Image (tube, rainbow, N blue to C red):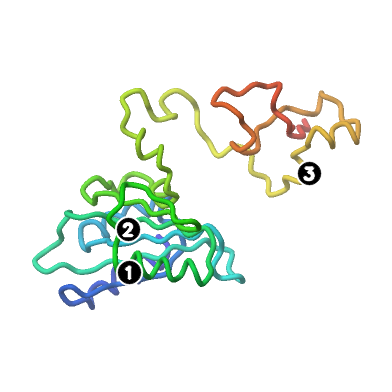
Amino acid sequence: SDIYVYFIVHGSKFLENNGRLGFIISDSWLTANYGVFLKKFLLEKLKLKHVIYFDKRVFAKRLVSTTIILAEKIKNGVSRDGEVVFIRVKNVNNSTVEKLRRIITEGLDKGLCESYGDIVVTKVPAEKLSANEQWLPYALGLKYYLMLKNHSLLVPLRRIADVNIGLFTLANEFYIVSSFKKEKFGIEDTFLKKIVVSPRELKSPIVDAGSVVNYVFVLQ
């Protein structure tokens, strides 16, 4: 586990009933394997109130994405009643800070997933959250994911395909070749294979090779 997990567990021991805990931590726990323990701890030992996710790095000199967790200790054990409010902050400015303050202190009465300009708020019943699932979709406020995740026609991708991280060289500028570069440098097709670099390049769920605009440079 990342060291902040131990600080959260240790810090919670100093809380009195109805005492509140807040930590600024990285966002890795939302998807990493060790995040299962932290999520289980937050759900079973505390009452998790808010998870605030920032699209952009808050600390300019630190190469880490940031989340804020707010939780409290409940008298006579922990209740899974109520909701966990996930807040996505797209940009940080005076306006968003004020909106955050109001959302946290005053609450919201609207629906499952609402957008307020640079802020997206998603409310999830605590009893519906599982420590074994990734929480990043909730933090991102993916409305249609939340609506479809339990649909009977949807299955995990790993059941129908081999899933892996793919190519990871830290040298994309060399290995990823655009159609423009291919023509400019006259690179032969023998050394290239088409590749989808980002889902943003896809116009439909079905990948048409003719619409793929990037290549990976293959040397054997």
Q: Position of residue 153 (x, y in %)?
A: 35, 23
Q: Earlier in the sequence, mark 3 or mark 1?
A: 1
Q: Position of residue 24 (x, y in %)?
A: 42, 69
Mark seen at residue 38: 2
Tell me the distance, in whole angstroms, between the alpha carbons under discs 1 and 2: 9 Å
Badge 2 amino acid: Leu
Residue picked out by circle 3 = 174
Badge 3 amino acid: Phe
Q: Earlier in the sequence, mark 1 or mark 2?
A: 1
Q: Circles 1 and 2: CB distance less than 8 Å?
A: yes
Instruction: Please rate how many residues cluster around mark 1, counting C-alpha atoms within 10 Å: few if below 14, some from 14 to 19, many from 20.
Output: some
Mark seen at residue 67: none
Quadrant of the rendering where the C terminus is positioned = top right
Residue under the point 71% across and 21% down: 210
Q: Circles 3 and 1: CB distance less than 8 Å?
A: no
Which quarter of the picture shows residue 44? Answer: bottom left
Badge 1 amino acid: Ile
Residue under the point 53% across and 36% down: 164
Q: Earlier in the sequence, mark 2 or mark 3?
A: 2
Residue picked out by circle 1 = 8
Tell me the distance, in whole angstroms, between the alpha carbons under discs 2 and 3: 39 Å
Q: Position of residue 155 (x, y in %)?
A: 37, 27
